[in-house]
């Protein structure tokens, strides 16, 4: 039986390689990589979370209080592998819910450290309520300013 000559150009080599693998195997490998990449993206332990949990950031947000205004930013420590995805897909709703929560508070309710601790726990419950399951494990204010 005569041997086939090796392909000479890069295009011929690519065609020969594509012909060597059946279409379902190649398609399955590509789909697997596409599905796996977002699931693993961003899930790396870092300095932000001492236990290796992912951290989502609530950027600088201005909110009105019942008798004033405030500006806040926070880091939310997330639970589970898909916590970051669940948080990011509900980001706008979470910000709106936190603004609505702050609208019911007065300045004296949020101006002491003890009051902010209570507000932190309330905000964690609000984030979990919006997402629909327990996603937020902790919330740390990186900025909280009253005018």
Image (tube, grey):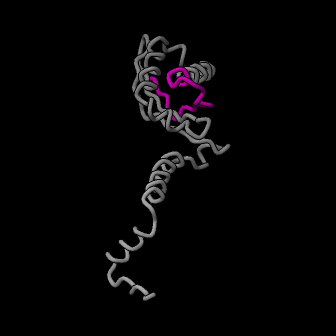
Q: Is residue 52 left or right of residue 109?
A: right
- Magenta stretch: give its range: 127-146
In the rendering, at what x and y percent does residue 97 appear? 45, 20
Vertical comparison of 82 with 112: above or below: below
> Is 138 one of the magenta-colored residues?
yes
Q: Residue at x 52, y 47 (%)?
A: 42
Screen quadrant of the C terminus: top left
Quarter residue 118 falls in: top right
Vertical comparison of 18 with 115: above or below: below
Looking at the image, which is closer to me, 127 or 5?
A: 5
Q: Residue furthest right?
A: 51
Looking at the image, which is closer to me, 137 or 73?
A: 137
Q: Residue at x 48, y 47 (%)?
A: 35
> Is 140 one of the magenta-colored residues?
yes
Q: Residue at x 54, y 23 (%)?
A: 132
Q: Can residue 46 be seen in this snapshot?
A: no
The number of numbered discs placed on residues in the rendered structure image is 0
In the rendering, at what x and y percent does residue 59 appear? 44, 35
Vertical comparison of 54 with 126: above or below: below
In the rendering, at what x and y percent does residue 25 appear? 48, 58
Screen quadrant of the N terminus: bottom left
Q: Is residue 136 left or right of residue 68?
A: right
Q: Residue at x 41, y 22 (%)?
A: 96
Q: Residue furthest bottom?
A: 2
Looking at the image, which is closer to me, 128 or 98?
A: 128
Looking at the image, which is closer to me, 91 or 61?
A: 91
Q: Can residue 45 be seen in this snapshot?
A: yes
In the rendering, at what x and y percent does residue 106 appear? 49, 12
Quarter residue 77 falls in: top right
């Amino acid at each position: 039986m005569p041997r086939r000559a090796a392909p000479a150009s890069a295009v011929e080599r690519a065609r020969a390689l594509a012909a060597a693998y059946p279409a379902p195997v190649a398609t399955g490998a590509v789909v697997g990589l596409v599905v796996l990449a977002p699931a693993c993206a961003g899930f790396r332990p870092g300095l932000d979370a001492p236990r290796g949990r992912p951290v989502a950031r609530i950027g600088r947000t201005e909110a009105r209080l019942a008798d004033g205004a405030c500006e806040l930013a926070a880091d939310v420590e997330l639970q589970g592998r898909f916590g970051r995805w669940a948080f990011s897909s509900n980001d706008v709703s979470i910000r709106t819910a936190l603004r609505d929560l702050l609208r019911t508070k007065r300045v004296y309710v949020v101006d002491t450290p003890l009051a902010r601790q209570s507000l932190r726990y309330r905000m964690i419950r609000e984030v979990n309520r919006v997402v629909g399951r327990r996603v937020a494990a902790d919330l740390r204010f990186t900025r909280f300013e009253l005018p």
